[in-house]
Image (cartoon, helix red, strand yellow):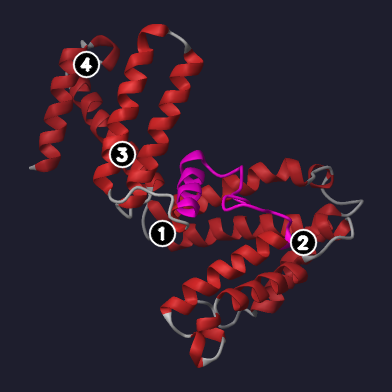
Amino acid sequence: MSDPKVDPAAALTRLLDIMARLRAPDGCPWDRVQDFATIAPYTIEEAYEVADAIARGPDFPQLMDELGDLLFQVVYHAQMAAEAGHFGFAEIAEAISAKMIRRHPHVFGDAETRTAEAQTSAWEVQKAAERASRAETGVLAGVPLALPALTRALKLSRRAARVGFDWPEPGTVLDKLEEESAELRAELPSMDKARQADELGDMLFVVVNLARKLDLDPEACLAAANAKFERRFGAVEAALAEGGRAPADATLAEMEALWQAAKRAEKA
């Protein structure tokens, strides 16, 4: 529960003042020399740390801490933009408020717009208008290049699907995956890394589309697979450690047997 003794406006003003002080001529030497390009990687990192705090469980103090770090990144960019005379935090907040109202006529509009169909239509119209205002043309325009590749592939394929460029059902995507797998297999003897990378990229893109057709998030699926691998490999290491050994001391056959044992234990 939020603390009623904390005034949101006062807390935000304090944060903005701290950021301005850090960037002042007599402020922090490190903060003073940063720019948008040098801070951007930290912004991305903090967003991932928020996601990590959520994925690891309901540790709300940690989540609050990570959200604070992410908010500080927004404040940092706002301060640098204000110093250059472009915009400040208030303009950011006003712009996103206006955008949310535009994109949700089913909430903020009249009764005629408060339907699921009107919501979908309005969203697409608004997104198209926003892209046009940025001189972005084409169905795929405006999908950020800095997104993780799986996420960007998902967004690109969703855009294409909205205009009918899509497989009819998941089974046909699996057929395409088998086709791409065969094409990659055909490239294995060539040792041509560029061609192999091209075919592997095609496979990954099809896998992302399969996830979309199944209404699954490919990033979340891969994250779960990573966690499962870590868990099972940890069980292999623990089993070997009981005999005073490490994975480097075991054969592949031994590790595979322990892996299968860990797998059976999870399913028991």
List x then y, in percent, for residue 42.
64, 45
| Residue at image mark 1 | 59
Magenta stretch: includes residue 111: no
The alpha-carbon separation of the residues under discs 1 and 2 comes to 27 Å
The alpha-carbon separation of the residues under discs 1 and 4 comes to 36 Å
Question: Residue 230, can we see it?
Answer: no
Which residue: 41% across, 7% down? 190
Q: Nearer the viewer, mark 4 or mark 2?
A: 2
Q: Which numbered tag is attached to residue 125?
A: none
Residue type at mark 1? Asp
The earlier-in-sequence mark between 1 and 2 is: 2
| Residue 251, quarter of picture | top left
The alpha-carbon separation of the residues under discs 3 and 1 comes to 22 Å
Residue type at mark 2? Ile
> In the structure shown, which secondary structural element does the residue marked by tag 3 occupy?
helix
> In the structure shown, which secondary structural element does the residue marked by tag 2 occupy?
helix
| Viewer-closest of 144 and 141 | 141
| Residue at image mark 2 | 18
The alpha-carbon separation of the residues under discs 2 and 3 comes to 41 Å
List x then y, in percent, for residue 212.
36, 50
The alpha-carbon separation of the residues under discs 4 and 2 comes to 53 Å
Rendered view: 65 above or below 96: above
Which quadrant is home to the C terminus? top left
| Residue at image mark 3 | 225
Instruction: Please tell me how crowded label 4 is: few (under 14), some (14-19), or many (20+) other residues with Cα within 10 Å.
Output: few
Instruction: Please tell me how crowded label 2 is: few (under 14), some (14-19), or many (20+) other residues with Cα within 10 Å.
Output: some
| Residue at image mark 4 | 244
